[in-house]
Amino acid sequence: MRQSTPRIRSVVTAVGLTYGSIVIGTVVVLAVTTLLTALGMDVASRPAWRLLLSTVLLQGVTFGGLAVLYVKFRDLGFGFVPFTIPDKRDVAVIIVGILSLVGLLVVASTIISSLGLESAQNQVVTVGQQNPVAFLLLVPLSFLLVGPGEELLFRGLVQGTLRETLHPARAIVLASALFASIHLFSLTGDGKIVYIGIAFVLALVLGATYEYTGNLTVPAIIHGAYNAVQFASAYLTATGGL
């Protein structure tokens, strides 16, 4: 029982970090949106502004602020979530990682289509289809905030915390499952399980690259590039470029 207690504590902490950050981020976004509306800024009717605000406040302010508070509270030091400039090996892993994620998405999409299944749609895509400029805005944000912010939380804090008491493979799997699960709150339509399943597989790659390199910059760039490719493709599709 004594040996299992630290493991249980780390799992509970990882779950708390995952869902607590989403709850806190949602409250922060709602509070700021309400304040801006009271000041006469109609954010609700401007999809691009709404996406910018949500991304900055969630992946940037909330995830970043939570990371600072967490490492300070536990007196871990920022070496717990190491960001360093990629070396040659890291660059090679980044390239392989990006190609792997894109390749896995293509394979998954082909299998889903051949089986006659449907995949749910992220609300971000719905907003972008109504206003394609939002997709263009999300391309740089993927590199600047989405990739770094989500990797800081899920690979840096969540996977890092689990890694303290669990085998690395188990830490990667559980962190990936938590990462995939939060997407449920932003999905619309049928096929939510299919979407979450794809997100889980892709997260395994991100977790493995972090474990292999020990450099959070690597999965952050891979994640950002993968999202940027998706948003750029969605913009071209929405505007008739493809």
Image (tube, rainbow, N blue to C red):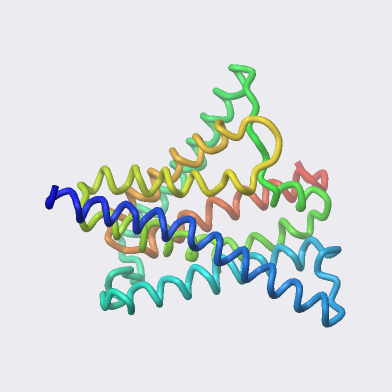
Residue placed most toward the observer, 201 or 76: 76
Q: Position of residue 205 (x, y in %)?
A: 39, 45
- Residue at (78, 59) in percent of width and height: 133
12 shown above or below 170? below
Q: For the view shown, which residue lies furthest in the top direction?
A: 115
Q: Classify residue 193 as left or right of residue 161.
A: right
Q: For the view shown, which residue lies furthest in the bottom direction?
A: 39
- Residue at (58, 66) in percent of width and height: 25
Q: Classify residue 20 as left or right of residue 132.
A: left
173 shown above or below 24? above
36 shown above or below 29? below
Q: Quadrant of residue 36?
A: bottom right
Q: Classify residue 14 as left or right of residue 120.
A: left
- Residue at (35, 52) in percent of width and height: 93
Q: How many badges with numbers are in the image?
A: 0
Q: Quadrant of residue 219?
A: bottom left
Q: Position of residue 80 (x, y in %)?
A: 28, 69
Work out which quarter of the rendered image holds the C terminus and state it: top right
Q: For the view shown, which residue lies furthest in the left direction?
A: 2
Q: Position of residue 54 (x, y in %)?
A: 66, 65
- Residue at (64, 18) in percent of width and height: 116
Q: Position of residue 39 (x, y in %)?
A: 83, 82
Residue placed most toward the observer, 184 or 124: 184
